[in-house]
Amino acid sequence: MTSPNKEISRKPSVARSYTSELGTVQEEQTGDETDQTSVSERSIGGQQTQDDSSSGFDEGDVMASLQSSPSLREILKTKIRYHYMNPFQKFRARRRKPWKLVVQIVKVALVTLQICLFGLDRFSLVTFLDHNRDALRHFFLKDYQGKWQDVVVYTREQLYDYLHYAHEQYYEITSAPLGTYNYTTMNGTEPPKMKLCYSYYKKGGIVNNTYVFDPNVTLVCFYLGRPVNHEHIITNKSFNLGRLRHISLKFSLKTVNVKNVKAWDKPACYQLNVTITFDNVKHDGRMPVDFDMTNIWLECVRGKIKGQNHLRTHFITVALVMFDYIVISICSLSLVLCARSIYKSLKLAKEAASFFKNELLEDFTFSDYQEFVSLWVIVIMSSDVLTIVGSVYKMAIDQKDSDFYDVSSIFLGTAVLLVWIGLLRFLGYSKKYNVLLETLKAATPSMARFFVCVILIFVGFMFCGWIVFGPFHPKFKTLDITAECLYSMINGDDLYYTYAEITRTNSPLVVWIFSKIYIYIFIALFIYVVLSLFIGIIADTYERLKDMGHVPETKIQRFLREPANVGRTVQSDVDYTPETTPTTEAITAPTQREGTSHYGRTRSTSAVDAIMRNFSLDSTGVE
């Protein structure tokens, strides 16, 4: 019998194999070089082969069992490698059908088609309501010229003329306009009366530059009867304009959205609630007139379309309902598959964490767990939930149960956005596309820090512009308008108008001078400096990744690329033998490697957290 030292000595070339869940995995090691064949290129279900080594082994030798059966380390490697495979590699490895990929492709097609059908219906409704709003403005507002021109009254005579005109037009609504309008209820032959409300200060007035005001506001409402021979209840003495805050006329109408009279898409009935407001809150000599209209869905009664093909109508109606059910079913299936994938990923991550802690004396960080759970799966699950909820609202709309167009559009719109973004996951299987995705991923931390600094500067300019130019410039009247104006200027939108709006005639000299300095500094800073730095961050990250040739390796990737049975640590190059047991210091503080690995790739030499390892705090991208 040979000595123990000779028994454990390995030949220059040793071939080993073992059977795992994926089939037969073979390894061959020559000297220090190890070529571990990818499990996806091996046949499935092969039988365990015998060790080719001619050395003798004792029956109780531990190394003999390691040579004849897979170790825990190799089994874990196999599972992790299979976890990282794309659907095509998994199909070649185990003939596993890529059901999730098929479901996602089908879901994208169905959700996109559903959005198109819903969009056509919603556009029809929005266009119908906008046209009715514009038509009623022309009908009720005297001398209305168009929505781009504000309606303002400046004299008492104009105020009462506008009130009388709107009041009289209300009783002509069924005969004068081109549209089809009706009153909500009828008291015999009389329509419901128009409601007039006005508010005023309880006490107050201005006489000889002295004023006395009671800030309490009183609201009074009453109904206006039909005028007889142009005689109105409202007269020139009806209101004390010195204390008046606002006057509003309120009434409701009914109309029908015909929708081209399609048998399977029946007309919809709506109640239009109209409010005409004369605003005198500022008491500045002018009263802006505002026309507001809201709609409420009504159930049409005794509606019928004659001459329709009932069989064809029933078929189309059922097909549209079944289509929504199919979309909900596909999204539910996708949601279940994604939840199952996350469960299996967390289970494998827990197994790997246990191995690293017990065998390698290394703890798993949060970033290590993130490597097992793909964020793309979270995006897909979010789109599934939004699609299901939006489809339920859409079905309620199709059944004419209620009006959920706004809510449904938000859910379905966000869902289709996430669905198409989720397709980037499959583009990542291509190396060329993956470089672009990894560039965005690697540059995200740097861009986030950059945006924090930029937002602080932007907010400062926003408040400064609003407080200085707000009274003199329409683009700086409010904070939100100011923010939109500045953001548009960053993109080069209408710069000259922003300059020219503030002139010497409509603003003080100091404000005019300050406006020139303000706008010049803002444009120079954000267009020439901020945008250039932002583009530079992405370009620098791309160049770093391009020079490296690959994404920096993580702890898990180094573990997968190590030679078979190299030792108890995934980062050390020390070859241990039974005579030399690795110390705790050797395991917890592994030797850093420089240059290239056995696989011809530059290996990371840092032992810090994955995010801190991949990104430098002193640079703009990947280290």
Image (spheres, grey):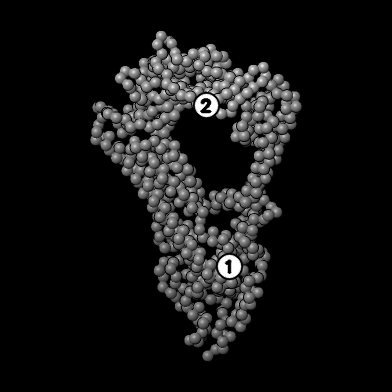
* Closer to us: 527 or 82: 527
Tell me which amino acid carries mark 1. Answer: Asp
> Element under label 2?
strand
> Residue 302 in the image: x percent, y percent?
27, 29
Tell me which amino acid carries mark 2. Answer: Thr
* Closer to us: 286 or 322: 286
Point out the frontmost of discs 1 and 2: 2
> Element under label 1?
loop
Give how far apart the Cα atoms at labels 1 and 2 are.
70 Å
Quick one: label 1, few (<14), some, or many (20+) residues within 10 Å?
few
Q: Mark on residue 218?
A: 2
> Residue 453 in the image: x percent, y percent?
67, 45
Residue that carries the numbered disc 1 in the rendered image = 363
> Residue 293 in the image: x percent, y percent?
45, 27
In the image, what residue occupies the spot 51% across and 64% down? 349
Q: Earlier in the sequence, mark 1 or mark 2?
A: 2
In the image, what residue occupies the spot 45% across and 66% down? 42
Is residue 130 visible in the rendered image? The answer is no
Answer left or right for 354 relative to 620.
left
In the image, what residue occupies the spot 36% across and 25% down? 184
In the image, what residue occupies the spot 38% across and 49% down? 330
- From the image, which quarter does the C terminus lie in? bottom right
* Closer to us: 463 or 213: 213
Answer left or right for 208 relative to 162.
right
* Closer to us: 619 or 155: 155
